[in-house]
Amino acid sequence: MADDDVERQVEKPRPAERSPHAVFYIANWIFFSNLTILFNKWIIDTGFRYPVILTCWHMIFATMATQVLARTTTLLDGRKSVKMTGRTYLRAIVPIGLLYSASLVCSNMVYLYLSVAFIQMLKAAAPVAVLLCSWAWRVEEPSLKRFLNILLIVAGVALASFGEIAFSMTGFLFQLGGIVFEAMRLVMIQVLLAGDTQKMDPLVSLYYYAPVCAVMNIAIAVATEASSFQAADLAAAGYALLLLNAMVAFMLNVSSVFLIGKTSGLVMTLTGILKNILLVIISVMIWHTAITGLQFLGYAIALAGLLYYSLGRDQLLALSHAAWLYARGGYEALRGSPPSAGGDDAAGQGPGQGGVGGGLPSAMRRALVMALAAVVVLVLFGAFFYRAGGEGGVGGAGLERRFY
């Protein structure tokens, strides 16, 4: 027994290999997601008015890139665990790929009609479409509580729509179509693959869906944009710029794979909400989009409803309580006084159990940081437009944003 104890003390476990912090993957995903949206909008606005052909090019590039990665890296090794038969391909990949293609086409077509800021506001209704499709396919049972929650989100999006100055019904319908097609795709993945116990990460999914989407988009492009398209349009847009655009869109898929693998669902939810807020702010600063007070109020209501829908009452209360304990512990540390009697020990948590003395769990800390950042950004967002409305623009250079 004594020898065993000595061996246990001598043979200490090797320290785990250091890997990038989760914040790196979060920042990576936010960067490439927002950059892809802004890049697409910029290319379409600067003369390349062919959103279907642009989507088609993205899918062709993704097809080639995933084939290369499958043969040269381990990023697509997950496909080896997928039992892809002809029946599965026809039942799952083809119909889901068609819906994915329709979603991408609509999402790019909308850039011809709406501002990026308003598009992001409309995207807050995406969970509503997913929930309604889940009820229609009987994946989930209807719930009055959830129905009231989605009504709040819908009300917020409706307010934002009523407040939109440059509203376009065509653009609104394209965005609505993109949301519905994407919701149907997500629900069909859940339904069709439920009994197959096959799970594909986004990159493996792209490996299978990209060829179907490329073929579908080529057919749509031939029927819609091919007659007016000329080779000179490619030269005008710039071959290098289009190649870079496709690479950025593909990097978004790669970054999403790493984000899913390195963070929790809670962190992803808060990150997604923060990403949308940042995108609204960045797009307004770039394109000088006018944001009315009614839009701001509607978007805030939609985000609040989305946060409640994604996390739930219990999770929100737990986060609020954890934030209070964490803040109180930091305040007492600054004062130089020991934690109060109602602190860690009263909660039954010692220094190593994730209480204030030992700090919150890393996932909880990241979630709190992201939530705090979202609140700060919202405050700055409101102050920015309030100041812009009062001064008649930033720098007085015709940047007319009014906050009513």
Image (tube, grey):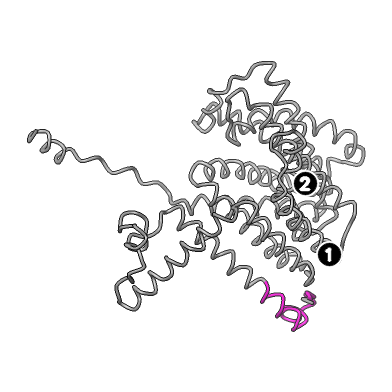
Answer with mark 2 or mark 1, whichever residue precedes in sequence: 2
Residue 243's place in the image compared with 357, above or below, is: above
Residue that numbered label 2 is attached to: 107
Residue 354: which quarter of the image? bottom left
Where is residue 222 drawn, in percent x and y?
A: 87, 33
| Residue at 84%, 47% in the rendered image | 174
Classify residue 362 by image quadrant. Answer: bottom left
- Mark 2 lies on a secondary structure that is helix
Q: In this figure, what is the number of numbered marks? A: 2
Classify 10 Å Cα crowding around label 1: few (below 14), some (14-19), many (20 and above): many
Q: Residue at x 51, y 29 (%)?
A: 72
Query: Residue 76 versus residue 172: which sits nearer the camera?
Result: 172
Choose between 371 and 172: the one closer to the eye.
Answer: 371
Q: Which mark is residue 208?
A: none
What is the x, y in percent for residue 155?
Answer: 78, 59
Residue range corresponding to the magenta coloring: 382-402
> Label 1 amino acid?
Glu
Q: Position of residue 48 (x, y in %)?
A: 81, 49
Q: Nearer the viewer, mark 2 or mark 1?
A: 1
> CB of mark 2 within 8 Å of CB of mark 1?
no
* Badge 2 amino acid: Ser
Q: Is residue 79 left or right of residue 161?
A: left
361 up-or-down from 326: above or below: above
Q: Tell me which corner region of the image, top left, top right, bottom left or bottom right, holds residue 301.
A: bottom right
Q: Is residue 221 magenta?
A: no
Q: Which residue is mark 1?
A: 164
Disc 1 secondary structure class = loop
Q: Position of residue 156 (x, y in %)?
A: 76, 61
Image quarter where the C terminus lies is bottom right
